[in-house]
Image: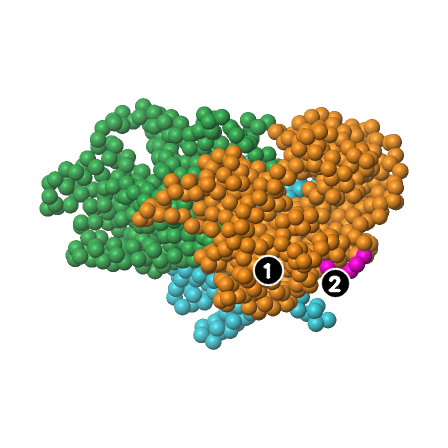
Amino acid sequence: MNLGISMFFERYKKIIVAFILIVLLFALGGIIVPNFLTVEQVLFTLKLASFTALFALCQMIVIAAGGSGLDLSVGYAATLTAVLTASVMDGQNANLGAAILIALALGSAIGLANGALVSFLELPPLVVTMAMANILQGIVNAYTAGRNITGRPSPILATLAAKSTGKFPNILFILFTITVLVMIVLNKTKWGTILFGVGSNETTAYLSGINVKAVRCAVFVISGILASLTGLLLIGNMGIAFKDMASNYVMPSIAAVVVGGVSLTGGDGNYIGVILGAIFLQALTNLLIAFGLGDAGKWLAFGIVLYVLLSFYASDRRSR
Amino acid sequence: MNKNNQNSSRPALSNYVFRPEFSSLLILIVMFTITAILQENFFTLKSIVRNINAFAPLILLAMGAAVVIISGGIDLSAGSALSLFTCVLTTVMKKSDPITGVYAILVTLAVAILVGVVNGFGIGYLRIPPVIVTFATSYIWLGIGLFLRPTPGGESVEWFRIFYNPGMIEGIHPYIKQFGRVIPPALILILAACLIWFIVSKTRIGRHIYAVGSNSESAYASGINTAKVQMQACIINSIFIFLAALFFVGQNQSGDARMGDPLTLRAIASAIVGGVAISGGKGSVYFALVGALILNFVNKIIFFADISTAYQTLVSGLIVIIAIAAPVAYTLYSKE
Amino acid sequence: MIVLEAIGIKKNFGGVVALSNANLRCYQGRITGLLGANGSGKSTMSKIICGVYQADGGEIKYKGRTVRYRSPSEARKDGIAMVFQNLSLVADLTVWQNIVLGKEESNGIFLNNDSAKELSRKILAQLLPDLDINKKVSQLNPGEMQIVEIAKAISQNPQLLILDEPTAALEQAQVKNLFDCMRALAKEGVAMIFTSHRLWEVMEICDDVTIFRNGENVATIDFEKDEKDPEKIISYITGDTQKTKVEKKHVAVTDETILSIKNLNYGKSLKNVSFDLKKGEILGIGGLAGQGQLELMHALAGAFHSLHCDAELRGKKIKLNRPLNAIKEGIVFVPGDKQLEGLFLKRSVLFNMIFPKMGLPGHPSFIPYDEYRRECEEIVEVLSIKTPTVDVPVENLSGGNQQKVVVGKWLPFDINVLLLADPAKGIDVGAKRDLYQYIVNQVQEKNTSVILYASDNEELVEYCDRVLIMYEGQIVASLEGGDINQDTIIACSMRLR
């Protein structure tokens, strides 16, 4: 029995660390900043963290497939989707279907391009998705050059992403549903097993009859689609689309995965941890804003958190 | 999965033709020719100097990127580090007091070495994947840069223009002015970087950078302090970025915490286009220079092709993908 | 004269005890053999002596002085050099650059390349005179790489030279050169530690052997005084006195051809390979190291997409250009490099066992875990895999048990052809015996056909009904019956017959 408990701690060590960090952060905020620990404020923090968590889901799936995969284009795919669908929706529920279709098409096209370049041409994921980010931002720039982005999200979208049921932000229901789905797919279906297998050892997976390249390509497609759909939610939350609306989520999406204890070498992934990571980062941001440290403080803190946690987790590997 | 078929001996000629350096040289010649045709006054002194000035920052960053990539790392923080250095330079300097320029150079050089040490410490000693370390540090540099310069600006001493165009400095000796007109300071900065690498490559450090990048475990087993070598590579890179920062502040007389961002990817792409293998251990730092020239010429050609500046980001992203995908696609195609 | 004495060395990795109380002595001008099963601690011992690992307890006396090296370079400065089992060469540097790597001489600050080249030529003159020292290591074959590795260690003028499995990749002739070289070094007074899985090599070259078991030294045999009795040595290694050979009852190899391969070509490594495999047959693949045997096994497993080959299974045409195609036909592959090609180390035994089913078309989306767990536990039982539960990560298992997992994951499949690529490489004698016992049983009970590539000719002699010898990617001989013996295999491998 003792063995069982110690195995549990060993396995979820990093998630426990993330949880402790969050508790410490909220405690610190509660002591120093007035109103930091009110129910409204905490729920608001969770709401903001949801978007980071959704982008981090894209990231986690790509990372889990291994091959030093990362997707730096997630934020840009979301921005492009939001910018393009804003005028399509034009505040009408009737147009939401079209917007979703556009998001799906755009997301899969972007993902397919990333995935094909990474898996079939074996180019480094980081450089490919960074270049893709440039291309997408370039399209946004070209599209918005000399014109205003018109259009508003459909009311349904706004209700889902921005409104609350009682005190409870609706986006949290979406996040909860997605979390349950992700946990089931990753842990109970063959897709999750294949994903983790490819991530832990591609040669073994290949020799076991798995089409490794197809899997590596597919994760980028999934990431692209999820990112685009998150772009829709983002415009639903903000009410308008603008040029840099989602690019700032790229860094937090990776940081959330790391804080959540997911190994960047692939082959594992626990979405609960990633959500905790997103909450931690959001709480940290709020705290810094409360201290009057805006952008500079946020990026500096994110950078340092990432660096410190990585060195902390890396010490596991070094001891071998 | 099929790594077992090594070609043991190839004929000597094809040995050279199939080297990535060869194709990048070929592309450079093509690009050079196209640009020379498109730009009427391409061969005039003024235009050459202008081109060197325009090309210098990317060349310096590309050479730095090459050193890090050869050592088995990668630097995603190059652009942010460049921005940070411009912020530090323009924060230390007071326009009215020329001696602050010297202080600024010394302080920024120290910062540059520190930047290299922090990156190298993460990559080498902490053994965090380089992509992630430098991704994290890029935000640290950005954060510090934003603290120093929330908006672009700052002060620079007048004589700092010597890193850009000595002709613009009042009261300077006419010979120096004349010299600066023929040999732009940017060229001297590039040559300085080349000289630094030339010396390093003939020493143990240079050999060990290749060894560690090719196979760090083997290098470690051979008694090489791999962490130290990776840190040295990061410091060399940082110094090259520092040289680029001198040029920028000389040119703009101001600092900007975000100005370097677009250069990160382009620097890495230049190194790859120049035949540096992203897996490490292979390629030449000088050919990163060739890669940077190619990317710069491409930009010029876009400019001459009259493409709207709104499309610049888009096109440069496409070019990076094409540049790195083309050789791979070609080999795959020729294998079939 | 005692050069090195290790007393009561202890070393733990995580919770696993690698060395509990290990002692070792090396003498000037003598070659000490280290023997032991995998996981017995002999490799760890070597690595502690040369500074790759640091001992948790105990004492190492080198030339009478207590030493504690924190890195290989510290040990090297004291004259202790090691030839690594996993090569320590850098593929992108040339032969001579590798030989001096880590100890380059400089004129002022610049490297002195001329002296480095001269030194490399001098050392290689003994070992492999034809080698071009300006070649990049990536262009060498495994045997040549191993020689360069040895040259690198010798170039340090060590007083103590540790050779950890140096002969694994070598051809017979190269082994002979190496042994000559070792004897010459011994004459100069160099002390050596030599490990090898091949017992006869140890008996040939060593002056004394120390045998390790479970992290302790259990016996030391001085060949000058004691007799060279392999059975006795094996009994020390395994810890029991059971006969180690698997009794292979005569199996009636049927006349039915199960797999027929014609004109198999792959790049430069496989040329026009054709053969038939009978039902119930154990077909051996032999030859010198690196003659295409591994590639052939991979090709049959469907690992090469651009493979050209006419393959028929029971008279039906099949394609072997994807692993899944082979698996669907019941052609399953047990790779020799289990950690690299056969396992998900960080994942549980259960995960590893059920993974091959995932790729099969028509596998239900939801994994029937209850059923699979029961099946997995059965397999663990059948193969006597030593693991507390099936949820333990495979990396916690010993090498032999890991290899059993690799075999075990194919058991639920309807196996027509079992491909074994050096399955006993790097596993201990006990696990090896279990493994072959199981395979032979499988053949006897189910008439499974087996293709066995083994780098150790003894395994071929012992288990195979027929042995194909490969040379430069081609099959050059087919041995049957009484021809399957060490001498004939070696002679055919070297194309002497």
Q: Quadrant of the C terminus of chain C?
A: top right
Q: Which mark is residue C56?
A: none
Which one is in front, B8 or C484?
Answer: C484
Say which colour chain B has.
Answer: green
Task: Give the residue at mark 2.
Answer: C388
Pointer 1 or 2: first along the chain:
1
Q: Chain of mark 2?
A: C
Instruction: Work out which residue is located at the far top of the displayed protein and give it.
Output: B37
Q: Position of residue B103 (x, y in %)?
A: 23, 58
Q: Residue at x 31, y 59 (%)?
A: B148
Q: Is residue A238 magenta?
A: no
Q: Position of residue A289 (x, y in %)?
A: 42, 65
Which one is in front, B295 or A81?
Answer: B295
Q: Give the chain coloured orange.
A: C
Q: State the extent of the magenta-drawn residues as a range.
A: C236-242
Q: Reply above or below: B127 against A84.
A: below
Task: Give the residue at mark 1.
Answer: C45
Q: Amino acid at mark 2?
A: Pro
Q: Is residue C217 left or right of residue A151?
A: right
Which one is in front, B279 or B61?
Answer: B279
Say which colour chain A has.
Answer: cyan
Per the image, label 2 sits on a secondary structure element best described as: loop
Q: Amino acid at mark 1?
A: Met
**Residue C311: quarter of image:** top right
Q: Position of residue A60 (x, y in %)?
A: 58, 52
